[in-house]
């Protein structure tokens, strides 16, 4: 079977997301995690250590990235510590082939945690949605108090220790027309690299924050204008999705697996859930997308024969996509958004279709009008 052979050829996961549990100290308006009492066990961590170590040793020529997610991963710091300490004992000199990352809401960072991050050579991503009025509109704690000041203090402590956090900013209907203020803040905080994600409205209660394709396009226009302005003043600040968007537009290989076709879900990335279930993507945490179980897997290679991965890679966009000149760029859109819109992956995302139809001519316009900006953004590709 050609598709089955393609899966075997492409199955080469290098990004492992370990979802430690559901607990979180915030109550963000757009959170898609179903709150529960789940937490990963040390037995499950031991099995994961064995599986991932075996994979690293077998694939000695490539780097493996392990990201701890939640909930809020710093609430599971003891589990992260346990995992890093024990996989280090197994891998020893091969540990230089592994990179650890935490994606945090940034509210729990203290001097002690900064020292721990530095000691373990952990990269850290922080969620910051903009200035205080924007951030606190959607990212509040369990007492309904804003989290902005705690996050900014956490970033300050990281920067004092020469740790460069990567910032993720979620754009909503409330913030899409305030991008200049968001970029200005990030630059002021000394952030050099960030990612601006449109909200993925997985739950019904997210709809009041959801962006239209045109609103996200407008946010991209503001983003480009802000970055060009800052770059011309000598500030070095980049936005990851824009880099990948231009790379894809120019026919280069995007770094971000979400911009590739087929995307990296289940091929370049695996998600190990705290309950033992394994998924292809952290936005496809659903019974329909279970590709295996940690406890019944003896080798990561076994997951490459999953029926779910076969279905993902064999997905065929509708006929209208074949007639579209932007198919190479979009290919029907993000699988998670297609699933969210239609409860099937065999279709296209109307949202992405509307967005790409607006943004593609604009990318061409920027390419012609600001070649130095594009060159600087893609120079490392």
Image: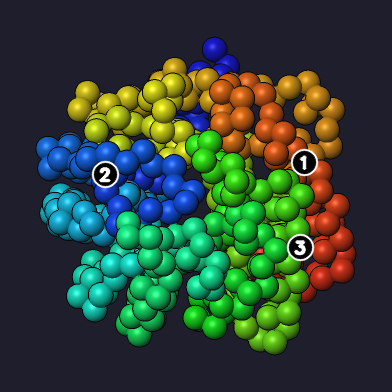
Where is residue 151 drawn, in percent x and y? 39, 71
Give me the C-alpha separation between circle 3 and circle 2. Answer: 37 Å
Residue at mark 2 to residue at mark 1: CA–CA distance: 35 Å
Q: Is residue 257 left or right of residue 31?
A: right
Residue pictured at 66% horizontal, 67% vertical: 179
Q: Is residue 297 above or below residue 363?
A: above
The reply to whether residue 194 is visible in this rendering is no
Callout 2: SS: loop
Badge 1, how many Cα within 10 Å: few under 14, some, many 20+?
A: some
Tell me which residue sits at (20%, 75%) in the image: 112
Quadrant where the N terminus is found in the figure: top right
Q: Which mark is residue 354?
A: 1
Q: CA distance from mark 1 to mark 3?
A: 15 Å
Percent x, y of residue 288: 44, 21
Left or right position of 16 against 169 = left
Mark 3 or mark 2: which comes first in sequence? 2
Return the x and y of residue 56 as percentages of the image width and height.
30, 45
Mark sitting on residue 21: 2
Give residue 133's quadrant in the image: bottom right
Residue beneath disc 3: 221
Give above or below for 264 relative to 296.
below
| Callouts 2 and 1 close, C-beta under 8 Å | no
Q: Quadrant of residue 163?
A: bottom left
Q: Secondary structure at mark 1?
A: helix
Q: In front here: 30 or 323?
A: 30
The disc at residue 193 is none
SS for callout 3: helix
């Amino acid at each position: 079977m050609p598709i089955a052979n393609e899966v075997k050829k492409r199955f080469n996961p290098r990004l492992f997301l370990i979802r430690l549990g559901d607990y979180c100290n915030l109550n963000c308006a757009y959170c898609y995690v179903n709150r529960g009492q789940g937490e990963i066990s040390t037995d499950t961590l031991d099995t994961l250590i064995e599986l991932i170590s075996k994979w690293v040793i077998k694939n000695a020529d490539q780097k493996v990235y392990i990201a701890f997610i939640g909930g809020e991963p710093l609430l599971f710091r003891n589990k992260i510590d346990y995992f890093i300490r024990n996989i280090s004992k197994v891998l020893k000199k091969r540990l230089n082939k592994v990179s650890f990352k935490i994606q945090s809401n940034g509210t729990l960072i203290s001097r002690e945690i900064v020292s721990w991050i530095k000691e373990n050579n952990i990269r850290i991503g922080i969620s910051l949605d903009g200035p205080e009025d924007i951030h606190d509109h959607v990212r509040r704690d369990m007492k309904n108090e804003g989290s902005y000041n705690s996050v900014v203090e956490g970033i300050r402590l990281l920067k004092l220790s020469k740790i460069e956090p990567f910032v993720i900013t979620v754009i909503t209907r409330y913030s899409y027309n305030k991008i200049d203020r968001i970029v200005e803040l990030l630059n002021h905080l000394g952030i050099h690299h960030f990612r601006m994600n449109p909200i993925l409205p997985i739950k019904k209660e997210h709809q009041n924050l959801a962006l239209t394709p045109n609103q996200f396009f407008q946010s991209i226009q503001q983003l480009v204008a802000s970055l060009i302005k800052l770059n011309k003043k000598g500030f070095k600040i980049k936005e990851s999705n824009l880099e990948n968007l231009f790379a894809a537009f120019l026919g280069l290989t995007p770094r971000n697996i979400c911009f590739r076709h087929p995307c990296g879900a289940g091929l370049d990335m695996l998600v190990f859930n705290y309950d033992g279930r394994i998924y292809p993507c952290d936005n496809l945490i659903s019974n329909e997308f279970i590709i295996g179980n940690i406890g019944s897997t003896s080798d990561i290679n076994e997951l490459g024969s999953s029926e779910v991965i076969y279905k993902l890679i064999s997905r065929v966009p509708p006929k209208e996509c074949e007639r579209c000149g932007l198919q190479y760029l979009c290919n029907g859109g993000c699988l998670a958004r297609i699933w969210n819109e239609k409860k099937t992956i065999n279709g296209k995302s109307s949202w992405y279709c509307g967005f790409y139809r607006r943004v593609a001519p604009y990318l061409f316009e920027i390419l012609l009008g600001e070649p130095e900006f594009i060159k600087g953004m893609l120079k490392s590709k």
